[in-house]
Amino acid sequence: MLDSASMIARVEEILDAHKGMEGALLPILHAVQAEFGHVPEAALPVIAEALVITKAEAAGVMSFYHDFREKPAGRHVLKLCRAESCKSVGADALADHARGKLGLDWHETSKDGAVTLEPIFCLGLCACGPAALVDGKLVGRLDAAKLDAIIGGLK
Amino acid sequence: MTLKIYLPLDSAAVALGADEVAAAVLAEAKARGVAVELIRNGSRGMVWLEPLAEVVTQAGRMAFGPMEPSDVAGLFGDLAKHPKALGLTEELPWMKGQTRLTFARVGVVDPLSLADYVAHGGLEGLKRAVTMTAPEMVAEVTNSGLRGRGGAGFPTGIKWKTVSEAKGDRKYIVCNADEGDSATFADRMLMEGDPLTLIEGMAIAGLACGAEKGFVYIRSEYPVAIAVMQAALDVARAGGILGDVLGSGRHFDMEVRVGAGAYVCGEETSLLNSLEGKRGIVRAKPPLPALEGFMGKPTVVNNVISLASVPVIFAKGAEFYKGFGLGRSRGTIPLQIAGNVKFGGLYEVAFGLSLGDIVDKIGGGTLTGRPVKAVQVGGPLGAYFPRSLFDTPFGYEEFAGKEGLIGHAGLTVFDDSADMLGMARFAMEFCAIESCGKCTPCRIGAVRGVETVDRIARGDAEAKPLLIDLCQTMKSGSLCALGGFTPYPVMSALTHFPDDFAAKEAAE
């Protein structure tokens, strides 16, 4: 775990890299999350001060968007598409299968910290669903066997 | 002799194993001591054949698919005997039936090769544009009949004219690449397969409107498109498309911005707030973004496909483009055929095909082989069409006339196992999750909608008129299309598939 002084130092480097950018808050939040796996609460006042907005505004923006996390996710993130095209080819049954197999509901992380299960609404893989995103890797034509193999590999 | 092989970097191809096939190609070439040039191109749009490899032969590009790593060795032998051989790509029925104007280069070229781009007609539009005055450029777009391909169908030329004539020390071109609708992937395919076309279209928009800065707002769910667009910006700058545009003395440059998982940011005013670093809350209109958009400055907000259709309009002329289509829907539309369908993918064609021809003839019916029950046209905010409406021609007004919309031209096919009450409930649930919260009909209505559908499912007969009333309120009282159009899937499910709502009552 990073100590807070070096975390703040890194956040300040990110802020420097975004100086002068119009509407920089989302790019900054993305960069902070890419660095730490989440947006640490202690980073928000630093970001807010640099952008001359209140901490409440920064927190409000962060909480609006599904992508930004307050806490780190599990070691692996399994995102299953829940949108219509994937539903038309059995995404609901697959989602139930995954939830049962992992013992997790949406947005939950397994007790050993291995997997976070999340819904996603469309990866643009609508002609080869059901689709999933496993730690950033796209998967199409998912079925129960493929899903079991994927889940088995998430340690 | 070097063996030249094309294999898509397109997300759909990658999701079906294209990277593994690519690795196998390189390994096989090395083992055989054969020189191979592997080009990662966009997808030809035949998703059921992905990963689709193409080998360059004297007769043309030969297609093979769907490829698995074990099929790779055969590409180094007698091609005609390869078990996955499909023939020449350009001769495949799916390709021959299309009119590819916007997608002419997608799947054909190396997405990041400017030389390839120019060799296939790229930059011809921009070269013509730099010789024209701004009003001439705006008139060209107006005359082409191009309408917003994002869904609203607003005439692109009128939007450009407003921005072009607006006073402002700075103006902006914003490309809406927040393609969040299920069944749509045309923006993604275009950005992954031919990003320079979008850049050229935005540069033309910049010259026509007097804007020197552009943004492409891409959803975070599209990592491949983001990476390709970023790389393409460098290619475009080095090639003189961006910066001092083709040495014309007029400047335009642009940036890629990444969304953060909010569906509502596909709505233009919400997108502008997000670009400004705010919550993606919808703005009331007026003021129009064309007058007070990004940072309060005059701003064009156009969809990817609208902007990517601009180069061909300038290269071949407004009259050429306008010559395709029907009624007030001019030009071509990239249909995205998705869901439970045998032949899914992207099919660019002039407006006017009937829904039935698209689903049955081009799509080949359902993947499961069961009867088609419903087709949702236009994404999560689009109506469910039953077979009885399959004669509806594909056009903006034609679909509006049937209480539907073409949206971004995505079609999700469902077989007879679909539960339409469940789909109506999902539409409300999705709206509740994604509502920005600014207006009451959407914020509260969607939650009440889920509850009301649940009451119908439990057999509460009084809930049905309540749902209809709620839909009317949401439709007329919401600030934007999220709350305003969620009633389309709900009402169409209820109207066209009453048995799915009645059967549950009887079962109670």
Image: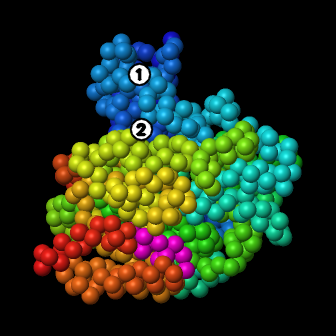
Using the image, determine if residue A149 lies above or below residue B282. above
**For residue B487, side relative to residue B366 (left or right):** right
Residue at 74% x, 55% y: name it: B142
Q: Position of residue B205 (x, y in %)?
A: 73, 54
Q: Chain of mark 2?
A: B
The residue where tag 1 is placed is: B87
Q: Label 1 amino acid?
A: Gly
Q: Which residues are magenta?
A: B479-489
Q: Residue at x 40, y 32 (%)?
A: B52
- Circle 1 residues within 10 Å: few <14, some 14–19, many ≥20: some
Instruction: Establish if B350 lies above or below B221.
Output: above
Residue density around tag 2, few if under 14, some if 14–19, many if 20 or more, within 10 Å = many
Nearer to us in this view, B455 or B46 = B455
Tell which subunit mark 1 falls on: B
Q: Is residue B483 magenta?
A: yes
Q: Could you confirm whether marks 1 and 2 are on the same chain?
A: yes
Nearest the eye: A95 or B469: B469
Q: Secondary structure at mark 2?
A: loop
- In space, the residues marked 1 and 2 are separated at their CA atoms by 14 Å
Residue tagged 2: B46
Find residue B155 and report its horizontal and vertical position in percent. Answer: 67, 60
Residue B463 image offset from top left, x and y in percent: 28, 85
Q: Looking at the image, can residue B433 be seen?
A: no
